[in-house]
Amino acid sequence: METGPMAHFVLTLLEALSVLFVLAVGIAILGLGILYVRDKTQTDSTLRRNYPVIARFRYMFEHLGEFFRQYFFAFDREELPFNRAERSWVYRAAKNVDMTVPFGSTRDLRPAGTVYFVNCAFPSLEHDTEPTRVTIGPYAREPYETSAIFNISGMSYGAISIPAVRALSNGARMAGIWMNTGEGGLSPYHLEGGCDIVFQIGTAKFGVRTEDGKLDDRKLQAVAAHEQVKMIEIKLSQGAKPGKGGILPGVKVTEEIARIRGLKVGEDAISPNRHPEIDSVDDLLDMIEHVREVSGLPTGFKIVTGGDEFLDDLCVAIRKRGAKSAPDFISLDSGDGGSGAAPMSLIDNMGMPLKESLPILVDTLVRHGLRERVKVCASGKLINPSELAWAFAAGADFVNSARGFMFALGCIQALQCNRNTCPTGVTTHNPKLQYGLDPANKAVRVAHYAANMRHELTIIAHSCGVSEPRALKRRHARIALGNGRSISMADLFPDAQPADKVVE
């Protein structure tokens, strides 16, 4: 039978596809054969040696499980470090969509340690109350006054991407909150958003270091000269790795990051586990006084506590020297905090959780008559209104969050932060992965998250009968004991008896 040109073309195409299919099958079989021989002869993996080729699927599923576990296998309130319900609230707050939920709470109030709040019979009438303005650093040449209550904690440029820094900087300006640079130095992307900035000095002193790793006063003065830089934070330790310095893998040290930090391109940025020149509370106070004098800005420090002995020693030393010698603020991180990558031995085991350390810090300052002088910033796994309400009830002046704002940027908790493979562009320098993070859009989400956090936190405060979050007290929170009963936080952590104010 005679065929036309179209039929001839179709037959030719089918023949070519058949050849390609056979070729592909042949290549696949050859590849499987090579993998079989390699697996059978290698000695590194017992599974691959006993079950060649098939065992490789185990590693693939194990890798993919990190991404799909939260969607298909984990319940709303069981995943760590943040469960789906916690992340979902942040996502909705950042998108500024309806944050109400139907048919009652799924939160179990029975486990020991669960915190809930005591509503009063006559709640405060709802109105958008401006939080109390707080002055930090009365003895600095340029004290900092702010009404912000929820701020962006330290995340270094290098640990997070350029689009992420840009979005956070612009979002912080829109929300009227501050942004902490992290220990990676001050980048142009921190400044371009126009927000208030807290410059962090880590143990490696990136951005303000001499060639041998000491503090360079001229570089510090140059940083402080930027109008947006409002405070200086000396980092002693952080939640992810108490007792160990920052870790930035060399794969993330680009030419620009190396220039800002004072490193070589591709060189691992491993910070010392402490400031070599700070070996005692007196050394710490000397460092604070020096940085405050050189910069002219309020100066404090960040720490994860391992007990109250250090805090008592610090306060005793301050009382001997006078109020002017005190840190202007203390940023207290939690043993279960930290956005950075760290050894599991530290992440899992080191440092006191904030639920215990924050009341201890506040009470220690009260006992020594320093509570009004030293402001307290709580940080570490505080991303929802109830957690912030607890921190203010415990005595904090401010709450800082890193991972909460990462979620506002679109983080899906894929746990790829240290591999330069973050699928949402937050913690990677791969341009293809950064492409999906639009700084303009995410800046709006950062601002929405901060604004909705403040709004819902104020709702809790009003329900407790006070006008704003900083008016919350320990009597407003109760803590479950695990036996069907609860105890007031005021009874569990009784308010300390104030001593005389420290002399000026």
Image: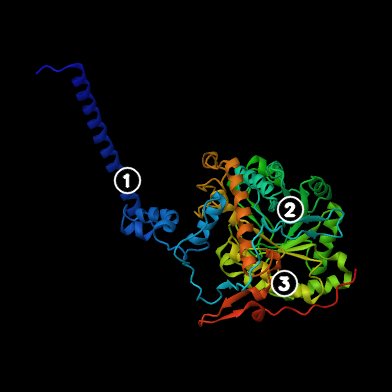
Give percent across and percent down for residue 125. Answer: 65, 64
Q: Secondary structure at mark 3?
A: helix
**For the residues carrying marks 1 and 3, which lies nearer the camera in this image?**
3
Q: Dividing the picture into quarters, in which one does residue 266 lie?
A: top right
Q: Secondary structure at mark 1?
A: helix
Which numbered disc, 2 or 1, marks the residue that appears first in the sequence? 1
Give percent across and percent down for residue 454. Answer: 64, 58
Tag 3 and tag 2, C-beta contact below 8 Å: no
Q: In the displayed structure, does residue 147 sit left or right of residue 218?
A: left
Which amino acid is tagged 3?
Answer: Leu
| Residue topped by disc 2 | 198
The foreground one among 384 and 273 is 384
| Residue topped by disc 3 | 361
Which amino acid is tagged 2?
Answer: Val
| Residue topped by disc 1 | 34
Q: Residue at x 51, y 58 (%)?
A: 100
Q: In the displayed structure, does residue 13 sit left or right of residue 221?
A: left
Which amino acid is tagged 1?
Answer: Ile
In the displayed structure, 256 sits above or below 379; it is above
Q: Residue furthest right?
A: 504
